Each structure stands twice: as structure tokens, then as C-alpha cells.
């Protein structure tokens, strides 16, 4: 049987892989680049694609970096891995730690994590600590814990995470006939935009690199405000972060690429999520829909042209609350006549 290839196998020559790195894989990466069929009328002069990261094994882009971080933790003989998370990092860490045979401790802000992500962390056997504080404070706590207790920290402050995540940029270049003009992605802790920019810088000369546009939620937009937000609020819980760890990386990516960081409202996010689901057939979680809300906003301001990639970072099934806003099932008699009346 051929081994199931993942990021470590597909990009071995561009990742810190050694002979001692375990061949960890759940088949992450190699996600579809789906052309938009529905947004064209709102986007004159723009050809839009979605990088569908919800197709990763645990349903988010985190798997690309997590496979590298957990493999390197195993390689170094770590006794366990630890992370703080708004949910997706925890789900991914729990899955890859399970596969690598490593214990996993995840620290989650109480009441602020979508139910599907919490279920993933639990079902993969992680020890789940729920703390009554923000993500930002939880991250500070696990940074300390990792040092004092000797655990491998697998948040995106771990350089192996960004190394793995940069592979999404390589894939986009493989999937398009020429580099995109712009890449739009949601920004929370700011690791992903930093990683994409690294990938594009490694793969392309300066004049062919895309503009990087980071999208935050209005109630959690420290990079747009230029200062930390003490009590961030947004329906997009994945990016409810007030003090991004990779702040400098995000600012540099936007500045050096000729892009920018912008903020969109929760209403714009939810509307984009509904349109993605109903008009494109893609069920992305709210944080991911922020990138599409960002595309619409940037297009209205005349700031986008050419080939644009919106990164859909996570699957909507992780946060099924969207279904509660959509049309409820109608109760009908089990007859053909009753069904006929519905269509
Ligand atoms: N989209 C989703 C679905 C996420 O889960 C995250 C981050 C982001 C976007 C933002 O990426 O942090 O690299 O800027 N989630 C982290 C977590 C914080 O704990 O799962 P970022």
C-alpha cells in the first residue's frame, strides 16, 4: 500500500524534516481551490477562488502546521503537547497528538468555543481545561506552563506551525496558472497570514507576490485599531482575539505586499456565511466567512482586481449555530402530495 501523503511528505524538501522526523500524516493539505460561481456580479474585474481549508482532516487549516509541530515534538522526545485555543487549534492538536501517541492538554476560554470543536478535542482524548478568561490570557498561561512543566507548546508561536501552514501558499501557486493578485484571509492570532506571506516570499520573486489582505471582526480588530483590545467580541469565536501573538508578522505581510488589514461587522460575516452556503455550496464557519465579507468590502472600495483567493479556513459543521439562523425543517405528512406542495 502506498502511504497516505500529507504535508510532511508532499513538501519534505521545503520543511524542517530530518531522517528522525516521524512520518505523521492524516492526509492533510492538498485542499481544493474552488472557483466562485455566485459572487461574480458583485465583483467586476475580479476572478474569485476559495481555498477550501475545511477539507482538511479535522476541518481546518490548522492541520497543516499541527502535523509538523506534533511530529517535531515527538522527534524531540516531548512528553506531551499543550495549547491554548479558540477551538480549531485544540481540535487539530488533539487529533495529531492522538495519532502520534502523545498526551495533549488544551486550554480553552470558557463559553467561547464552538460546540463541534470542543467535541473534537474531547473525542480525541485530550485533557480539556476550560478557563474563565480570554484566549489571550489562556495563551500567556500555556506559554508559561510549557516552560515550567516541559511540555511542547503547539500554538502558532511554535515556528514549526508556521512552516507547515506556509504550504497552503505553495498549493495555491500549483493550482493556478499564474500567481494570484490578492489573497484574503481572516486574522485572529495572526499566524496564518504570517505563514502565507512566508510561503509566497519563498516561492516568488518580489514583483510576483500577491497582496495580502487580513480581515478581522470589528469587535476584535486590534491590528486595525493599532492597539490591543481587552475584551474582544465577535460571533466569529475563532478570531475573538485582542492581542495577536504574530502581530508584527501580520503588519509586515500587509505592508510589504501592498495589502492591508481591515475589519468587517458581524452582520457582514453572517451574511457572507449564508451566501457561501446557499449560493456556492460551501459551509464555512463564521471566521472563514470573514474573508469573503472582506472581499466584498475591498471590491466595493475598488481595492481588488484580477485573480483573488479567499481562504475559507474552517468547516461550518464545527459551529452548527448557523443552522439555527437558516430555515427550519417543515413538518409534513409522509405523502407524495405533501412533498409536491413544497417544491
Ligand atoms: N479561521 C479560523 C477558522 C481559525 O480557527 C483561526 C484561528 C483563524 C481563522 C485565524 O488564524 O490565528 O492564524 O490568525 N484559530 C486559532 C485557534 C486562534 O485557537 O484555533 P490566525
Image (spheres, rainbow, N blue to C red):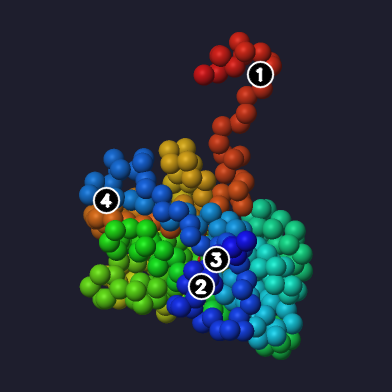
Q: Earlier in the sequence, mark 1 or mark 2?
A: 2
Q: Is residue 55 visible?
A: yes
Q: Secondary structure at mark 1?
A: loop
* Residue for point 74% across, 72% down: 101
Q: Earlier in the sequence, mark 2 or mark 3?
A: 3
Image x and y of residue 232, in percent: 54, 64
Q: Which residue is mark 4?
A: 46
| Label 1–label 2 contact, CB within 8 A | no
Q: Of circles 3 and 4, which is in front?
A: 3
Q: Is residue 139 visible?
A: no
Neighbour tally class for label 1: few under 14, some 14-19, many 20 plus, Cα within 10 Å: few
Q: Earlier in the sequence, mark 3 or mark 1?
A: 3
Q: Earlier in the sequence, mark 4 or mark 2?
A: 4
Q: Which residue is mark 1?
A: 332
Task: For marks 4 and 2, give the CA distance.
Answer: 29 Å
Most extreme residue toward the top, as rendered?
337
Image x and y of residue 153, in percent: 64, 80
Image x and y of residue 25, in percent: 61, 67
Neighbour tally class for label 4: few under 14, some 14-19, many 20 plus, Cα within 10 Å: some
Q: Which residue is mark 3?
A: 6
Label annotation for residue 4: none
Q: Which residue is mark 2?
A: 164
Q: Earlier in the sequence, mark 3 or mark 4?
A: 3
Amino acid at each position: 500500500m502506498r502511504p497516505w501523503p500529507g504535508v510532511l511528505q508532499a513538501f519534505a524538501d521545503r520543511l524542517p524534516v530530518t531522517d528522525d522526523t516521524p512520518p505523521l500524516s492524516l492526509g492533510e493539505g492538498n485542499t481544493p481551490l474552488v472557483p466562485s460561481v455566485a459572487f461574480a456580479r458583485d465583483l467586476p474585474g475580479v476572478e474569485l477562488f476559495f481555498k477550501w481549508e475545511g477539507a482538511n482532516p479535522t476541518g481546518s487549516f490548522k492541520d497543516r502546521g499541527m502535523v509538523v509541530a506534533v511530529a517535531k515534538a515527538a522527534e524531540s522526545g516531548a512528553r506531551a503537547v499543550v495549547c491554548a485555543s479558540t477551538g480549531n487549534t485544540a481540535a487539530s492538536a488533539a487529533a495529531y497528538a492522538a495519532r502520534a501517541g502523545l498526551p495533549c492538554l488544551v486550554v480553552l476560554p470558557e463559553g467561547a468555543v464552538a460546540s463541534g470543536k470542543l467535541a473534537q478535542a474531547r473525542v480525541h482524548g485530550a485533557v480539556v481545561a476550560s478557563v474563565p478568561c480570554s484566549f489571550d490570557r489562556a495563551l500567556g498561561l500555556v506559554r508559561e506552563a510549557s516552560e515550567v512543566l516541559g511540555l511542547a507548546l503547539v500554538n502558532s508561536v511554535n515556528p514549526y506551525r508556521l512552516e507547515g501552514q506556509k504550504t497552503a501558499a505553495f498549493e495555491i501557486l500549483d493550482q493556478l496558472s499564474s500567481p494570484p493578485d490578492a489573497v484574503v484571509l481572516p486574522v485572529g492570532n495572526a499566524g496564518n497570514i504570517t505563514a502565507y506571506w512566508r510561503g509566497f516570499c519563498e516561492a516568488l520573486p518580489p514583483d510576483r507576490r500577491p497582496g495580502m489582505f487580513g480581515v478581522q471582526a470589528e469587535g476584535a480588530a486590534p491590528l486595525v485599531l493599532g492597539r490591543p483590545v481587552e475584551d474582544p467580541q465577535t460571533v466569529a469565536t475563532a478570531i475573538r482575539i485582542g492581542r495577536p501573538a504574530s502581530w508584527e508578522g501580520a503588519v509586515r505581510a500587509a505592508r510589504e505586499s501592498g495589502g492591508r488589514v481591515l475589519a468587517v461587522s458581524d452582520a457582514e460575516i453572517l451574511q457572507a456565511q449564508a451566501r457561501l452556503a446557499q449560493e456556492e455550496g460551501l459551509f464555512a464557519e463564521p471566521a472563514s466567512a470573514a474573508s469573503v465579507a472582506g472581499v466584498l468590502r475591498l471590491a466595493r472600495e475598488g481595492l481588488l482586481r484580477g485573480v483573488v483567493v479567499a481562504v475559507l479556513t474552517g468547516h461550518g459543521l464545527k459551529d452548527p449555530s448557523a443552522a439555527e439562523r437558516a430555515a427550519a425543517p417543515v413538518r409534513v405528512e409522509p405523502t407524495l402530495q405533501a412533498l409536491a406542495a413544497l417544491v
